[in-house]
Structure formats: C-alpha cells, structure tokens
C-alpha cells in the first residue's frame, strides 16, 4: 500500500500543474473577454500577414 | 432647399472635430495612454455605440484605414477598444477623430484617466474559484476513504495522519484566500451595524472550519475539510452566477465620468485650452456645440440650448436666456456659448448630489427586505443552534457538536445555494427583458414593493408619442396646406410633429405635391416660408413677436393666427399596464408630475382616484411625498419609478429607485434598477417575477429541509451509511440548484424579451 504515498504525490503534482496553468491563463487576460474572440474567428483573415509584420 | 442642410452638416462635422483640439496637448495625451515605448503607444478607449459583430469587423480593420495604427482589438462586452499605434505616423487626436467619423465616438472624461480595477476583480474571482475547486477535488479524494468501512481501517492506520495533513494543507489557501470576500463583507456588515447575507455565511464557514480543525488536532475524527472546501467552491460559483455584471452598464458611475477633460477658457481675447482641473470661479468659458459643461455656470450669451438628456434622460432640449444657470453635465446644442463659472468643478450641483447620496441612502434603506430576511435568518439559526446545544448541556462535547452541526447544515443549504442561484438567474433573465438589477438584494426588495410611485414626464410619457394641440383662429384647408408645406421643409422636430399631426387630422394623404416657394429657417427661433403668395411664419413667441409664454406660434401674412402646443403622450401600452397594476389589490400606485394637470384625463383610468394623482410637483415635493409615504406606511417597501435628475431625490428616498431610460448607458443617479423604457410596459409582470424569487427560495429551502429530515430519520434508524451520506449531500445541493434555476426560468417564459441596444 505504500505506493499510495507516491501516487498521491503525483496526483497533487499534476493537479497543481493544472491550477498553475489556469492561474497563468487568467492572469494573462485570456478570460477577460469571452464574447469577442468568438466573433473574431469568423472573419476572413487577410490581415494576419500585415499584422505579423509589425 | 437641401443645399443649406448639407452645408450645415459639413460645418457641424468640422466644428465637432474642433472639440478634440485638446488632444494636441501632450500632457492630456500622456494621461490617457496606457504605456508608450520606442515611439509606440497603447490606448484603451470606451466606445458606447459598439454593439454587434460588424463593429468588431470594422474596428479591427482600423490599421487599413490609418496605417499609423498597428493593431486594434475590440472588447465587445466591455465596449472598449485597445489601440496600439506608432506615434511617428499618427496621433491620438487623429485616431479619435477617425473613430468619431466612423460613428464610434469614444467617451473621453476624467474617468478615462483614472481607471483600472474592473478587469482585475474578475480575474481574482476566477483564481479564487480555481483554488477552491482544486482544494475541493483533492480533499474529497482524501476524505473519501473515511466514508467506507475499510476506509475507516485505512484511516486508522498510518494514512490518516497523511490525509489529515494534506486536507489541512489544501484548506489553508481556501480559508485564507478564496473565502476572503465573505469575511470582508460580513465584517463590513458588522462594523456598519447592518445585516447582510454574508454574516450567516461567514458564521457557517467558521463553524465548519473550526470544528474540522478541532477534530483533526484532537485526533477525534477526520474533520469536514471536503465539505468546507466544497462549500466555499459552491459559494463562489453562486457569487459568479450572481455577479453577471452588466459590463456596459455602470450603476455606481463616478461623477468623473461626466466631466470632460478639457475646456476652452477665454483670457482677454484669447481662447486657451486648459485642463478642467485648473478652472477657477469667474473664468469665462467657451463651450462649443456638443460639448459638456464642466462646472455650474451662468450663461453670458443671449440665448442657449441645453441638452440635459445626459443627466435626466429627457430628450427635449432646454432653452435658457442670458443670466440663466447651467449645471455641470449639460450638453450644449447649436451655437457656441459663452459662460461664466459660478462654482468650482468639485462643488457643482452634480457632484454635491453625488456626495450626499450615501448618507440618505443608508438612512432611508434601513428597511432593506433582504437585511430583514438576513436578520431573522441569522437569529433563527443561532437560536436553533444554541437551543440544540443546550439540550445536551452537561455533555459539553455533544453540545458543541450539535451547535456546530446546526450552523453547518442551516447556512449552506438555504442561503448559499438557493439564494444566489435563484436571484442570480432572475437577474440574468431580467437583463434580457431590459431590466438591470444593481444587486441580488434589489430583486427581493423590488418584488416586495407595495407602493409604486410613477413619475409622468419621460417615464410614462414618451417624446415619440408626441401629441399636438392647436388653439386660435380656425384653420381652413388652404391654411393647413400652407403650414404643412413649410413644416416639411424645416428640419426641426416640432415642425415635423405639426406636419404629421395636421395631415393626419385632416386626411391629407399625398404630401409630396405640397412644396413651398421660399424657405428660410433661423435655428432656435423659427422659420418663414412663402406658399402660393402667402407668407407663413412659425416659431417661438419671440420670433412671432408675441409675449405669451410657451408653444409654437403661427402667423400668416403677418396676422397672428394661434399656437400649437406640444406635449408628450403616454407610451403605447402603458395604460393597460397601469390598469393591471391598479387591479392588483396588494399594490397602490401614485403618479407624480412636474407638469400641469391639463392632460390628467389620460391617466385617470390607470390610478385609483384623485388623491393618487399629483401635479405641479417640484423635485423637492416629489422627495417629500416619498417621505410622507414612508411615515404613513412604515414597514412597506416603496418603489419609485423615474427618469432622471429631477426625480433623483425621490429615487434616493424610496426603497427601490428605478431609473427608466431610452438608452441603458445614459446616466442614472441614485438608482437600484435601470429599466429600459420598453420593459416598462411589462412592469407588472416583471414585478411579479421578482416577487416569485422569494417563493422559489422558500421552495428550495423546503427541499433542503426535506433532505435533511430524511437524512436525520435514516441516521436515527441506523440505516444511513457514510457512503449514502456522501451521495445524499451533493444530490441535495444539485436538486436545490436545479430547482432554483428551473423555476425562475419557467416563470420568466411569459415576459417578452426586449431587444437590447
């Protein structure tokens, strides 16, 4: 049963990784605007080239 | 006759761009920019007129229109755009002028300079939720073995220490970070001696956490860390559900949102652009067309047209003569005005009203229904917990056991789940119907309102339902055609109204054949036209050289004929709504109006008897009337429905102030609910809907009581296994949430949705 110690360690590590990833996503503003990106993706993107040149 | 119109439009466009001249001042520009580096800069602007997918498409293509713009990103929900541009190639002024030309004029005010905060609070909310959810998932895993018989053995072994330790570790960030807002609110409530719903919630959390700590440290049991983290997690979800903030709508708009950044000061003969913060009393200001007056001032020009719609929501401009006071926040229409500052910006009537608000609010709102609810609920819970504990008294550990158990069970079930989800869902669905509640407590209060006071002008009436009356010499068919010919040439809305009214009344279908020969309009006064050899003049009393007060005067060939009177008629569909309200015996309705009682007959059918209709009311009298109602009906909730600053006093005095606006983004002082004018037609249904909130919460409460009773009975009979408990708890929570959301959605089905702006 001692393997549980190790498994718990892994599970906490993995879950903690997701928590950190989520926190990073929130802090980098990915959840600030949840309506516009859905619309934005529908436009034909020729402007992408121009924008990448900036 | 089209030509002068075009010229004036061009002139107007040029004029209106002039008002952005202050953006050439680099100090002002710097205060607007978010950051600048290597000649590039970023700015975020609020664009109130953004509304659809096409706006996103157009505004994100700005780099094609102005190559100096490197990138533009629109945030639809927040109605704001972030523009990254090259300072060498373009300027902030030309960007703003471009936006204005495209029809998206940015809101530039003192508030634009001092912002931040809004986005961050949402982010913190998400992180709080994530941490609580993370802890909930993990503690649940570690606590699960404890629910099984074998698990008991397992827990008894060397794992128990590890699991308890991990549970404790995970619970720390939850109590210290995730649950913080509840403690803060509860503490604020205790300090200001007002009850709020967070007080019992904070008590429940503390009881649960304290007891778990005690069990873990005294080694008497595994504690309830899974229930604790789960509780905080559900609470935060409920909060998020409730929060559904209306991004584009601000109830707590700061006064600074309404004061412009800059103004033109006249020094000697020179016009100087100065920041508003450096204006002094006695300064002479030049205010152009469409500009906002920054401070209370006296008019120095002969005549001025002022639009207070920014403040009051009333669309009819006010005419002022020399010496008249203009209050800060008013917008100038037409010719440029010269005014003299009478009060400092910080002491304007607008700001004083603002600063006075919290005091009167807390005084008059002692009767908060929700706080009454919270008070009784808290008292009831604590009473029950103490009573339960007392019964076991000699045995202290059992007594504490029962005491905490009651707190733990009573708090979460009814309040944390049923309340937020029911009220939150009502808020969400009401927003679709054009009603925006400031907070969930307002929903309960609105529903329990028993006296409803309506303002007339701008609230029950609409300028779209404009009606015309004529008094004076009898008009013959020829006269009518003459008048219509001139009216059609004029662009003034009053002329249009007269034309429409005359042609409708006299059945003149084909208006196209009626053309006048000569037309000359003097903006703000009236017009002169020639038709079949006659001269027609229509305009203000001064224009026609008469002395009688109001109305639009008519003279034909120099002979004074009579006058047209305009008044706003009741909105379509408003009278049936008033009648439905009148038929409801639990509600008393009143009408307050600043106007004369000439058109009272429109409203008599909608109100009970003459005592409920009051005319000639000044803003102070309106507020006093609410006070009198309070005194007369002590425990009742008074709802005031008004439309702007002239009702502001009454709105603040009432328990629930509802501001009715045509545009939801316009300024609404001291209100708890913003209601679109279309939603007003379903006022009675909306009120019933809000009222249903408390019965839904009661229903959800009964469901949780039922679950608890079943659980308790099973436990007493010895049938309740730990596994069954573990299943029963989330099932009861989900039932309560499902019931709350389901019932509120079902009850909203009859109320039509209002097309939002």
Image (cartoon, coloured by chain):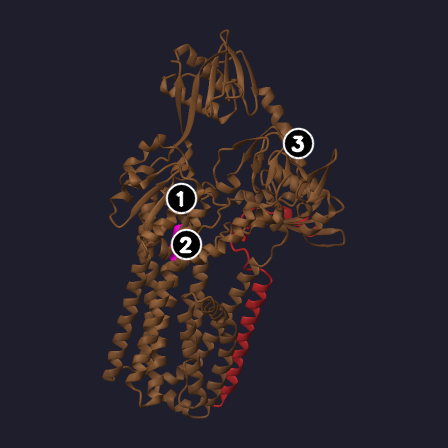
- Picture disc at residue B136: none
Which one is in front in this view, the residue at disc 1 or the one at disc 3? 3
Give the Cα separation between the discs numbered 1 and 3. 37 Å
Instruction: Return the residue nearer the eye: B726 or B93.
Output: B93
Instruction: Return the residue nearer the eye: B554 or B222.
Output: B554
Mark closest to the chain's N terminus, 1 or 2? 2
Q: Residue at x 51, y 13 (%)?
A: B516
Q: Is disc 1 in the same subunit as disc 3?
A: yes
Tag 2 and tag 3, C-beta contact below 8 Å: no
User: Relative to B115, does residue B519 appear above or below in the rendering?
Assistant: above
Give the Cα separation between the discs numbered 2 and 3. 43 Å
Magenta span: chief secondary structure: helix
Q: Provide the residue designation for mark 3.
A: B14
Mark closest to the chain's N terminus, 1 or 3? 3
Q: Provide the residue designation for mark 1.
A: B754
Q: Is disc 2 in the same subunit as disc 3?
A: yes
The stretch in magenta equals B424-431
Q: Position of residue B325 (x, y in %)?
A: 57, 37
Q: Position of residue A31 (x, y in %)?
A: 54, 60
Residue B590 in view here:
yes
Chain coloured red: A
Q: Few, some or many C-alpha atoms within 10 Å of disc 2 (few <14, some 14-19, many ≥20)?
A: many
Tag 1 and tag 2, C-beta contact below 8 Å: no
Chain under disc 2: B
Give the Cα separation between the discs numbered 1 and 2. 13 Å
Which residue is situated farthest in the bottom direction here? B157
Chain under disc 3: B
Q: Secondary structure at mark 2?
A: helix
Instruction: State yes or no: residue B331 in magenta.
Output: no
Q: Position of residue B409 (x, y in %)?
A: 34, 75
- Picture disc at residue B428: 2
């Amino acid at each position: 049963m001692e393997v549980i110690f190790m498994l718990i360690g892994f599970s906490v590590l993995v879950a903690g990784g997701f928590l950190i990833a989520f926190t990073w996503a929130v802090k980098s503003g990915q959840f600030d605007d949840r309506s516009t990106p859905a619309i934005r993706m529908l436009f034909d993107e020729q402007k992408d080239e121009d924008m990448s040149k900036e | 006759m089209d030509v002068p119109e075009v010229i004036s439009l061009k002139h107007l466009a040029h004029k209106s761009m002039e008002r952005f001249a202050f953006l050439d001042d680099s100090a002002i520009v710097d205060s607007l920019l978010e950051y600048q580096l290597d000649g590039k800069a970023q700015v975020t602007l609020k664009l109130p007129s953004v509304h659809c997918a096409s706006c996103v498409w157009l505004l994100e293509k700005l780099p094609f229109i102005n190559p100096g713009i490197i990138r533009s990103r629109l945030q639809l929900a927040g109605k704001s755009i972030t523009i990254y541009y090259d300072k060498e190639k373009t300027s902030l002024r030309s960007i703003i002028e471009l936006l204005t030309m495209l029809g998206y004029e940015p809101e530039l005010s003192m508030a634009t300079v001092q912002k931040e905060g809004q986005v961050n609070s949402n982010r913190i909310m998400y992180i709080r939720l994530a941490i609580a959810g993370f802890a909930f998932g993990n503690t649940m895993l570690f606590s699960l073995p404890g629910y099984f018989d074998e698990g008991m053995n397992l827990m008894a072994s060397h794992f128990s220490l590890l699991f308890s330790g991990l549970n404790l570790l995970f619970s720390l960030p939850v109590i210290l970070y995730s649950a913080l807002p509840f403690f803060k609110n509860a503490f604020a409530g205790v300090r200001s001696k007002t009850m709020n719903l967070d007080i019992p919630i904070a008590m429940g959390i503390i009881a649960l956490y304290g007891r778990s700590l005690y069990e873990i440290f005294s080694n008497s049991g595994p504690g309830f860390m899974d229930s604790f983290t789960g509780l905080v997690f559900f609470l935060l979800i409920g909060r998020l559900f409730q929060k559904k903030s209306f991004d584009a709508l601000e109830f707590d708009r700061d006064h600074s949102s309404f004061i412009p950044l800059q103004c033109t000061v006249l020094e000697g003969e020179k016009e100087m652009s100065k920041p508003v913060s450096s204006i002094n009393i006695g300064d002479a200001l030049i205010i152009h067309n469409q500009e906002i007056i920054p401070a209370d001032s006296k008019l120095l020009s002969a005549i001025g047209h002022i639009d207070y719609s920014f403040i009051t929501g009333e669309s009819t401009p006010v005419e002022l003569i020399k010496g008249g006071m203009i209050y800060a926040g008013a917008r100038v229409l037409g010719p440029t005005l010269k005014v003299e500052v009478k009060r400092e910006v910080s002491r304007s009537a607008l700001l004083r009203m603002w600063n006075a608000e919290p005091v009167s609010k807390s005084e008059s709102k002692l009767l908060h229904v929700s706080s009454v609810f919270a008070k009784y609920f808290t008292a009831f819970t604590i009473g029950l917990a103490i009573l339960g504990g007392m019964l076991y008294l000699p045995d202290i550990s059992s007594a504490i056991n029962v005491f905490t158990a009651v707190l733990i069970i009573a708090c979460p079930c009814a309040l944390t789940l049923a309340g937020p989800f029911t009220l939150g869902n009502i808020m969400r669905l009401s927003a679709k119907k054009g009603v925006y509640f400031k907070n969930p407590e307002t929903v309960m209060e609105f529903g329990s309102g028993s006296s409803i006071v309506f303002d007339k002008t701008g609230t029950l009436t609409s300028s779209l339902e404009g009606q015309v009356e004529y008094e004076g010499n009898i008009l013959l068919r020829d006269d009518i055609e003459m008048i219509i010919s001139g009216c059609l040439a004029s662009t003034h809305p009053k002329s249009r109204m007269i034309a429409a009214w005359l042609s409708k009344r006299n059945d003149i279908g084909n208006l196209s054949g009626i053309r006048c020969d000569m037309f000359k309009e003097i903006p703000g006064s009236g017009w002169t036209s020639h038709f079949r050899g006659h001269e027609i003049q229509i305009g203000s009393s001064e224009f026609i050289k008469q002395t009688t007060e109001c109305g639009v005067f008519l003279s034909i060939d120099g002979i004074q004929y009579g006058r047209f009177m305009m008044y706003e008629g009741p909105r379509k569909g408003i009278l049936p709504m008033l009648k439905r309200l009148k038929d409801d015996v639990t509600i008393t309705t009143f009408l307050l109006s600043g106007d004369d009682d000439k058109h009272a007959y429109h409203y008599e059918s909608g109100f009970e008897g003459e005592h409920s209709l009051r005319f000639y009311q000044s803003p102070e009298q309106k507020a006093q009337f609410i006070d009198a109602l309070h005194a007369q009906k002590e425990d009742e909730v008074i709802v005031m429905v008004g439309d702007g600053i002239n009702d502001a006093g009454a709105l603040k005095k009432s328990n629930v102030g509802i501001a009715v606006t045509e545009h939801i983004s316009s300024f609404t002082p001291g209100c708890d609910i913003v209601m679109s004018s279309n939603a007003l037609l379903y006022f009675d249904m909306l009120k019933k809907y809000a009222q249903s909130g408390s019965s839904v919460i009661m229903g959800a409460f009964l469901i949780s009581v039922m679950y608890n009773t079943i659980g308790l009975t099973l436990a007493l009979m010895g049938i309740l296994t730990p596994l069954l408990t573990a299943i029963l708890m989330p099932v009861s929570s989900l039932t309560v949430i499902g019931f709350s959301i389901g019932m509120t959605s079902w009850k909203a089905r009859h109320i039509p949705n209002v097309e939002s702006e």
